[in-house]
Image (tube, helix red, strand yellow):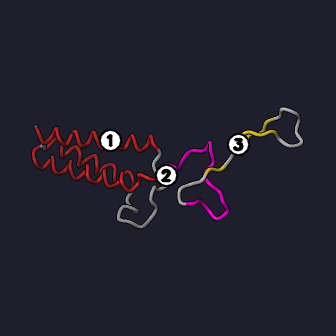
Amino acid sequence: MGDWWTAPGGPAGAVERRWTTVPTRGGGSPGGAGARRGFRRGDMRRPLLPGSGPLAGVSPVLAFLVVAAVFVVAVVVGGMVGTVLLALLAVGVAVLLATTWQRLSPPERLARTLVLAVLVAVTIGVALR
């Protein structure tokens, strides 16, 4: 049937927009409902991996500020201390990327991989300084 179809009982050539469902990862709900085409992939405020892990209660703003502060301190201090701090940030980003990989769309994967690559490049630059 597809996404477009002629409305039954309607005038000839009348077209009504119908949403089709596509299977979601994990099989979807028992009723067979999947993700709708035409809708955003996910709500940006919804956690990617809901749970009760160590970061579940941390404010996203606080997490961003801590990561930004560690990055700035590492770049300013430099040397071995800065390299270790940046390497720890890179490992953290890599772990988060690996755990959320299946739930990310290809553009989100690309963006996060580029962030990791830039962080690794900065780490190498600080190490060689």
Query: Between residues 20 and 126, which one lies in front from this camera angle?
Result: 20
The residue identified by callout 1 is 115
Specify the principal SS of the magenta part: loop
- Assess disc 1: are there few (<14), some (14-19) or many (≥20) residues with their C-alpha within 10 Å of its C-alpha: some
Q: Horizontal placement of 102 versus 24: left or right? A: left
Label 2: few (<14), some (14–19) or many (≥20) C-alpha neighbours in 10 Å = few
Q: Amino acid at mark 3?
A: Gly
Q: Which residues are magenta?
A: 27-45
Indicate the position of residue 67 as horizontal and vertical percent values. 28, 49
| 10 Å crowding of disc 3: few (<14), some (14-19), many (20+) | few
- 96 to the left or right of 73: right
From the image, state whether disc 2 or disc 3 is nearer to you. Answer: 3
Of the two numbered discs 1 and 2 on the same chain, state the one appearing first in sequence. 2
As drawn, the label of residue 45 is 2
Could you say which is closer to the camera, residue 27 or residue 125? 27
* Quadrant the N terminus occupies: top right
In the displayed structure, 128 sits above or below 99; it is above
Residue at (62, 62) in percent of width and height: 29
